[in-house]
Structures are given as C-alpha cells and as structure tokens.
Image: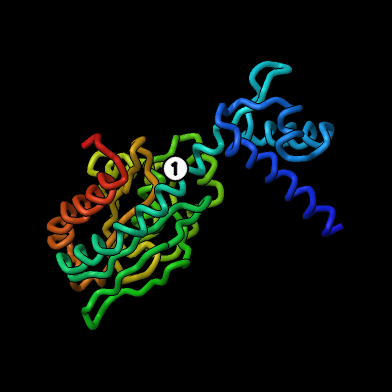
Amino acid sequence: MENESTGVIVKTFKVLEAFLIEKNGDIGISQLASLTGLKVSTVHRITSVLVAGGYLRQLGKRGKYTLGLKFIDFGNAIKRNLRIKDIVMPIMENLRTATGESVNLAIRDQDNVVYVEHVDSKQTLRTFTEAGNRAPLHCTGVGKIFLASMREEERIILSKKLFTRFTDNTITDFREMEKELSIIRREGIAIDNGEMDIGVRCIAAPVKDSDARVIAALSISGPYTRLNNKRVEELKPLVRGYALEISRTLGYTAE
C-alpha cells in the first residue's frame, strides 16, 4: 500500500513538473501524457484531483490545463518567509535596544498565536517565551492584533471557543472585547494588561504584507514595574514604528 501511494505521489509531481518544461503554460491531456510518460487515463485522474484542489485550472470544459492560483499562494508564502527571516531579527534587536524589553514576533494559527521569533531583554527582571510557544488570541497583545483584523462573523464564531479566564484582567465578554478591538484598529496598537500572566504587560502592533493583510504581530513584553501606564504610552509609537518598518520591507505602502 505504501509503495502504491508513493507511486501516485511521484506521478502527480511528474504532471506538475511538466508545466516547468512546457514554455507555453497551457498543456492538453495527450501532451501531458507524452511529457510524463504516463497513460492518458492516469493523467486524466491526476489532473481532475489537481483541478479540484486549485493546483491546476482547465481552460474550458474540455480545454487544456494551466497552473492554478494555489501556486500564487505558495509563491507569496515562500517570499514572505524568506524575507521575514532575513529582515526581522535585526529589527527586533533594534527594538530591544530602543525599549530595553523582550521582543516577540507571532503569527496566527486558528484560535491561537504561535511565537516564531523572540529576543530576550538584557534586564535581570524580564519576560521569557520561546519560538513555537502558543497562546490564546483573546488574552495576548499579539492575539488581539489578529482579532482586530478579522471580520465580525469570524470573531463571533471564535468567541464560542475563546474567552477562557486566565487572570482577573482577562476579557471574557464579547461586547467588551469588541470595544477594545475598535480602539486597537484606531490606534494600531494592542495592549495585554496582565490578561494571560499576572504582572506582565505587552504592547503589540500589526505586521502587514503588500496586500495590507495582517500576517504577523510584533510586540514587546515586560513587568508592570517598568511598563507602567506612562511608559506604555511612551513606547506605543516605537512598537508601531518598528512593526511598520517590517511591513514596508514586505511591500506594504499604505502608510
């Protein structure tokens, strides 16, 4: 069974790789069979599956095939990941120098955030996280950035699973959260006031791509003793500015 499955996968990649060979980009079933050395019936089955998945498009009911729009998503993902790795760490280190606090970069995964990069503060008293750590959306600064960028219908669905109380400061009411998200959209900044961990504050801002989509969130985090209300207001523009610097490198031009 394993060999049979492997064989199907190899044949599928042969079909896809044929589009790298054919310069015109549009290929019919017979030509695909010739380029891959596969039977016409096998090519027909494979192309049907690839069309259903968005990996190929058929030009007309009985027309030729071309690569589907799914590969645009893959291209954008590759470009985004490569560029973020190249640029994000120096910017995060500069933000740490400017603020003295730990710096985090997070992405969304369903109803959680995943921290993908972290730069430790050099202070003795500091907050810790590691790349790969997960946290809920509703009680973290980075998570609220993603909530603020969603459609209301999506937030309503998520609210049925979210809003677990972690501390006395955790927001567990949908209407209260909606008010806060309105402020976040206006200011471009989200605050975690000890909503996940008592005594810890976080200031977060969105990272956007060339299509103005929120693809990540940049934040600083530290203890209440340093991130008091006055200091938070002083640091908001810095966090927002460094997040914008990353966004601009990714092609964002709206600001």
Quarter of the picture containing the N terminus is bottom right
User: In which image quadrant can residue 147 be found?
Assistant: top left
Which residue is drawn at the image coordinates 37% and 43% (left, top)? 214
Residue 239: x %, y % from top left: 21, 55
Q: Among all residues in the image, which is located at the extreme bottom?
A: 124
Q: Nearer the viewer, residue 221 or 59?
A: 59
Which residue is drawn at the image coordinates 78% and 31% (left, top)? 44
Q: Nearer the viewer, residue 17 or 6?
A: 17
Return the residue at label 1: 76
Q: Nearer the viewer, residue 15 or 106?
A: 15
Identified by mark 1, the residue type is Asn
User: On the picture, is 178 further left or further right than 70?
Assistant: left
User: In which image quadrant can residue 26 be found?
Assistant: top right
SS label for mark 1 = helix
How has the structure been colored for display?
rainbow
Q: Among all residues in the image, which is located at the extreme right?
A: 1
User: On the picture, is 150 further left or further right than 203?
Assistant: right
Dot 1 alpha-carbon crowd within 10 angstroms: few under 14, some 14 to 19, many 20 or more: few
User: In which image quadrant can residue 86 be found?
Assistant: bottom left
Q: How many marks?
A: 1
Which residue is drawn at the image coordinates 23% and 67% (left, top)? 93
Residue 228: x %, y % from top left: 18, 65
Quarter of the picture containing the C terminus is top left
Q: Nearer the viewer, residue 100 or 90?
A: 90
Residue 234: x %, y % from top left: 12, 57
Instruction: Check the image and report above or below for 82 versus 37.
Output: below
Residue 122: x %, y % from top left: 22, 78
